[in-house]
Image (cartoon, coloured by chain):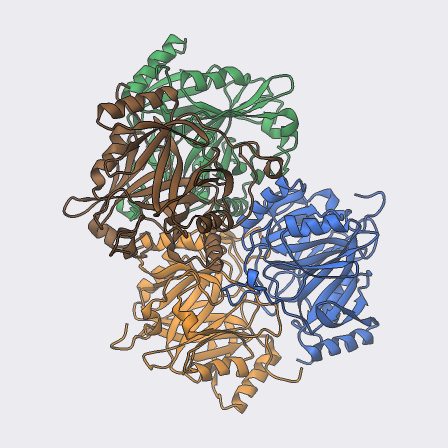
Chain colours: A blue, B orange, C brown, D green
Amino acid sequence: MSSFPRFGDVAHVGHVELRTPNPDASLDFFTSVVGLHETARSGDSVYLRAWGDYERHTLKLTAHATSGLGHLGLRARDEETLQALVTHLGEHGFTGEWTEDVGHGPAYRVATPDGHAIELYWQTERFTATPAIATAFKNQPQRYVPRGIAPRRLDHINLLARDVTPTREFFQQRLGLRLTEQIILDDRTEAGAWLSATNKSYDVAITRDKTGASGRLHHVTFMMDSREDVLRAADVLRDADVPIETGPHKHNIGQTFFLYCFEPGGNRFEIGAGGYLIFDPDWKPIVWTEAERAKGQAWGLQTVSSFHTRGTPPVEGFD
Amino acid sequence: MSSFPRFGDVAHVGHVELRTPNPDASLDFFTSVVGLHETARSGDSVYLRAWGDYERHTLKLTAHATSGLGHLGLRARDEETLQALVTHLGEHGFTGEWTEDVGHGPAYRVATPDGHAIELYWQTERFTATPAIATAFKNQPQRYVPRGIAPRRLDHINLLARDVTPTREFFQQRLGLRLTEQIILDDRTEAGAWLSATNKSYDVAITRDKTGASGRLHHVTFMMDSREDVLRAADVLRDADVPIETGPHKHNIGQTFFLYCFEPGGNRFEIGAGGYLIFDPDWKPIVWTEAERAKGQAWGLQTVSSFHTRGTPPVEGFD
Amino acid sequence: MSSFPRFGDVAHVGHVELRTPNPDASLDFFTSVVGLHETARSGDSVYLRAWGDYERHTLKLTAHATSGLGHLGLRARDEETLQALVTHLGEHGFTGEWTEDVGHGPAYRVATPDGHAIELYWQTERFTATPAIATAFKNQPQRYVPRGIAPRRLDHINLLARDVTPTREFFQQRLGLRLTEQIILDDRTEAGAWLSATNKSYDVAITRDKTGASGRLHHVTFMMDSREDVLRAADVLRDADVPIETGPHKHNIGQTFFLYCFEPGGNRFEIGAGGYLIFDPDWKPIVWTEAERAKGQAWGLQTVSSFHTRGTPPVEGFD
Amino acid sequence: MSSFPRFGDVAHVGHVELRTPNPDASLDFFTSVVGLHETARSGDSVYLRAWGDYERHTLKLTAHATSGLGHLGLRARDEETLQALVTHLGEHGFTGEWTEDVGHGPAYRVATPDGHAIELYWQTERFTATPAIATAFKNQPQRYVPRGIAPRRLDHINLLARDVTPTREFFQQRLGLRLTEQIILDDRTEAGAWLSATNKSYDVAITRDKTGASGRLHHVTFMMDSREDVLRAADVLRDADVPIETGPHKHNIGQTFFLYCFEPGGNRFEIGAGGYLIFDPDWKPIVWTEAERAKGQAWGLQTVSSFHTRGTPPVEGFD
């Protein structure tokens, strides 16, 4: 029990800030098509959450010259752990600064080795439903509102990294996340790493950016209650004229059921469901080889080539 | 970080030992109707697991004069935590003894305040599939085998207690589980408590035994991947001539979808799916009042009266 | 091929007119909670349809002093068949009159032996979507709009009859529907009959009215795409403060998955999914005995006692 | 009512005879992997059915030098209609011969314009369950047996034709099926036609054989109760080492959810679920253009190129 940090010290992915050069259209997509709920506005940002999210927001949309990740918010286990994480990060050369934002207490902002902004925080505001969306389900922050896709909650983020390994180690060693699955190519390159702060099979994924760029975003994912709900989401996207990049299909990694599209700001967005839970506290990471990945996803769908190069902000010459 | 134990120190419910006065019929039920897989036999016991369970067994069936709980196995976070838990228990007057069993390392057996046998262990044998049931899903211990109901995994146990509070405090204070939901009657009696060692909304439930008996079992639950699977399980039970006590329906508590029946040894058995995950590390327990419980389950089904008195072993004069 | 009418001569249940003494609340329920689409208003009536219904309306809500059935619209196979049905009815003593209504051509109105108004018609207006709800699914009349429960289509009607047999024979012999299932009590009374104009296991059900009244309505049913959708509908109803009378559960008859509630006008309303299709052109009706019915629904849920007496309009002294 | 035949005169697709050069492996696939039930053997043939099929068999597997269609069995509405259909066929130059087979009465065997063997019959043997698979669901021929994929029933057949139009007209004009959907290319070629004998959106599909061959089979389809079941079937196929050609995905045509694989004899086999029902007796066929088809399936999956050339028996130089 002496080691620090341990699994559980970062409790979960709290929120994701997406930058969008097309803020009105992005907001319309996330509210009308995805069905998220707006809870605040501040400066160039609009704050959103899904009906099952307990915090004031899980998605922050910020008008910006480019698309891409603003920051990733991670909620610590408690106040004491937050302070210890900050100290620990400093001891390992990850120095950042304390910042403030809507909806939660002081957040310590620090960069991953690949340059993604991370914010660690503890204090948070829990969402309280207005009477119009109050619910008899006492263990749920508000009622289910059937508007658009209506996912239940933020699920995970997938970062792109020029070099996966140091950023994977950052989440694993500096933040205590558990490495659950991994892609190791024939030349020993780590092409992808999936890490978890919870019993879910992943909360943060890091995959190799073949463009050679750093600090980019691959996608953000919200979760449905059932795979049937993902199939219905596909119908909603079609009739909203939002092309599906790939899916619905089942990932080999995590066994989650997925579909991908792009929001109007250019960021990739995933709707998911299912997947397995990990209870083994001594879980051995599952390693996928190049040959295994070449077989495609769980039922044979080939991984689309844009998956390895298209991220946000875009890199010229790649799509 | 100084407090001990903390949430996560008990990693998860590992297995449940059920006693049965009707061992052959119980075994046939759990293999043919439920579709569990036998992995070992020893003495009067047969060891079983579901296709998604990573350990060698999650259900131990033991021939006995009566029905009821043999013991509840809880896997610790690591070896060091196991030892610390044993020390901690002793400091608080819970002294037990080290025992041995098939499938895992040394287990420390201790009784809850209400008398249920608990075993804490760390070392375990992971299940390795034979070629006949090997799977291409590398993150899954074996292939899905469509036999009977075919649940994915053990989910939770519900204990009956003459007095809920001390046993709830035992799991909460001595073992670090998180109290997630609770029933408090008008006279302040704690009629039920739901606790979790994971992000699931509960792993151990304790409900009041209205017969006044101690140490009894209410039910053990295995989990399906979808609610649709629970509906199919109901068909399978019907054609296997296994009456459904109540359900399928949705619990208010945990929002899990459920059905209950009795295995031939007399123990109550639940098939479940769904429910919500808890990510908030500072979750405030949901408290249900007597009036709220009187409204029945989530969609209005009245809780069957046998739920408050029928447990195993049976108490004469109650059913 | 000489017999007339034959199965298929009545093509399907086209629409149901419900009377409501509470028209504003009923309309709000069917649009906001159920999620139907308004397509016309005329006189005291509002015309509604589900997103998958091909005709201009499938539910007509009419303000009236009481609740109950206005009429049941049945669409004939073609014009020639419609005329032949009218002649045939007259030859067997069922004389009615031609009427006009919004959304379809001339309809011949005639009463069942128990007094329910039936309207037979052929010409109809197909629904054409406005651009706002147009769809890329060319074989679907409009896009799926996730509002409230959002059923796909009208499914069936259940009439109450003081004497089931003559009204069952009316649909079977005079209109060519196929008898698919039946309840025959120990004293040979026919307590229920399920008839179909299509490959669905029933389109019209007739069950005995234990109050001794005539011409009453038991319920009208709209259909979801999946049983999972019915479970979601139950959540929507709960948060809309609409009590569920019984269900979700599976009917023995038809194997449909169901839930029942009451619309603000007092009429019983069912949300369903699933069930089996009948392809056998020589289907032998399934007969359920009193003892079999006493076992409850498919998974054991007891049929609620109000099912045998509560209908619309209400009968004093019964509920 | 004077026209003949009319919709409904052919009641449904009764069975399909598949030829296989690999009979033992094909039988093992259809029983162990698909989970069909063997009901008879005769000569070089084994007769199979799904748990929900009411007739003695719906799939006849016949050892043969090549793969491909043996024949397609269509059940007539009644004996009188069967005789009238035979007369009608002869009047239009389609002369065949009466044949005998296991499980049903005399069948009239005739060839489609493209050369596929069709058998029309009326008398049939209904399946009667042995006690081991008897069911409490009285409206179901046997209990659901969870073995392999376990589809409910035979659904449809897809024929390949060198020239779609005459074979489509054969089913439409000579057998009374309803044309429900159609693909018309820019040059006015009819590339595909979907026809139905029931309220399902299709029972027989005919698509253009780009190899120029005649009389070939594209695929045979069995149906699951839910789309979730199709997703599970994909897992079962993967672990049985049966590659999935394409899917799971949603067809634009019929809106059915699908996956395709090949049985060991080489014939394409589909597992499906869902789709819409047609109630309109005056349904206007949905026509898909070349441009619309180029957009892929419902959610954008491109139709695999092998779909236009790979059929059975195989044509040299095409795959």
Tell me if residue B283 comes above or below residue D121 in the rendering: below
Q: Quadrant of the N terminus of chain A?
A: bottom right
Q: Residue at x 62, y 35 (%)?
A: C131
Tell which of B197 and A146 is nearer to you. A146
Q: Is residue C81 left or right of residue B225?
A: left
Residue C225 or residue C96, whichever sits in front? C96
The residue at the point 55 percent across, 16 percent down is D163
Q: Position of residue A128 (x, y in %)?
A: 60, 67
Judge from the rendering whether residue B314 lies leftward or rightward of residue D318; answer left or right. left
Residue D51 image offset from top left, x and y in percent: 37, 41
Q: Quadrant of the C terminus of chain A?
A: top right
Using the rendered view, name the quadrant where residue C106 is placed: top left
Relative to B17, residue D140 above or below: above
User: Which quadrant would residue B71 be assigned to in this image?
Assistant: bottom left
**Badge count:** 0
Could you say where residue A235 lies in the image, as x and y percent from the top left? 59, 42
| Residue D107 seen in render | yes
Q: Is residue D263 visible?
A: no
Q: Position of residue D82 (x, y in %)?
A: 32, 19
Relative to A105, residue C319 above or below:
above
Task: State left or right for residue A293 relative to residue B247.
Answer: right
Determine the residue located farthest toward the left in the rendered image.
C187
Front residue of C270/B160: it is C270
Which residue: 54% across, 91% down? B91
